Amino acid sequence: MADECFAHPRLAALYDPLDPDRGDLDAYVRMAREFGARRVLDIGCGTGVFALLLADRGIEVVGVDPAEASLEVARDKPGGDRVRWIHGDATALPPLRVDLATMTANAAQEITEPDAWRGTLRGARAALRPGGRLVFETRDPARRAWEEWTRERSYRVTDVPGTGAVESWVEVTGVTGPLVTFRWTYVFAADGQVLTSDSTLRFRERQEVEADLVGQGYVVEGVRDAPDRPGREFVFVARRP
């Protein structure tokens, strides 16, 4: 089930205005070019920012996401009709043959249950052509990123066109082993409505992810650094033999 920040229509409409700098996607655009990808599966595509970046470059894109509200935002964007949007997840995809499958931002970590994670890796592998690659990122647990997720560090007021001022902040509500749970709060100045969204991320060790990939039939080609968060994330490149 998708978190409220992606599934609630009012919150899904805020996703892009509250996070307008998507420089983190530049590395994925470069990798699509590096691997000569002409067909891409974007798993956890959200509001379609990355999928549309690729479509603008003439790449055939399939975007899949469990949050219908986020997909509605994606469909309504300029060029949205050039992407094939699928409501669901990678465990139940129609037959595909893509050159590249991606999970950008927190998409991989949002899959917290081991069975769902393995199912996602299998689904991505089935969608890839032989020689195709899966690329995704996950935060290095050793850097303990969640310790910075406090109201004091995250509080801001954003003037959203057509909506007005929105207050937002995040607070960690629990840490249990590799699982970190946190709550975003949003306050709409126009009508005083307060909405919250609880999320959980799984912080996996590098060796754990590599073992999972090998176990699902991939060859791990490399583990790269994230240009936007150097030393803080692993970017995995795995190939379907």
Image (cartoon, rainbow, N blue to C red):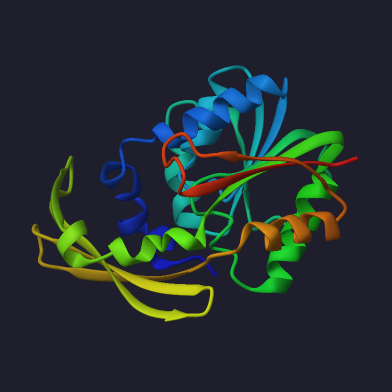
In the rendered image of this protein, does residue 237 appear above or below residue 111? above
Rendered location of residue 194, percent (x, y): 19, 70
Left or right: where does residue 137 sit relative to residue 163?
Answer: right
In the rendered image of this protein, does residue 56 appear above or below residue 145? above
Residue 145, image quadrant: bottom left
Is residue 137 among the parts visible in the rendering?
yes
Residue 148, image quadrant: bottom left
Rendered location of residue 119, percent (x, y): 76, 63
Q: Which quarter shows the N terminus?
A: bottom right
Q: Which quarter shows the C terminus?
A: top right
Left or right: where does residue 130 sit relative to residue 105?
Answer: right
Left or right: where does residue 96 sit relative to residue 27?
Answer: right
Rendered location of residue 224, percent (x, y): 60, 38
Residue 193, image quadrant: bottom left
Rendered location of residue 185, percent (x, y): 24, 67
In the rendered image of this protein, does residue 94 appear above or below residue 192? above
Decide which of 38, 224 is in the foreground and name it: 224
Number of numbered tags placed on the structure image: 0
Q: Residue at x 10, y 67 (%)?
A: 192
Decide which of 63, 226 is in the foreground and name it: 226
Q: Residue at x 30, y 37 (%)?
A: 20
Is residue 81 among the parts visible in the rendering?
no
Decide which of 42, 215 is in the foreground and name it: 215
Q: Residue at x 69, y 33 (%)?
A: 40
Left or right: where does residue 212 sit relative to residue 177?
Answer: right
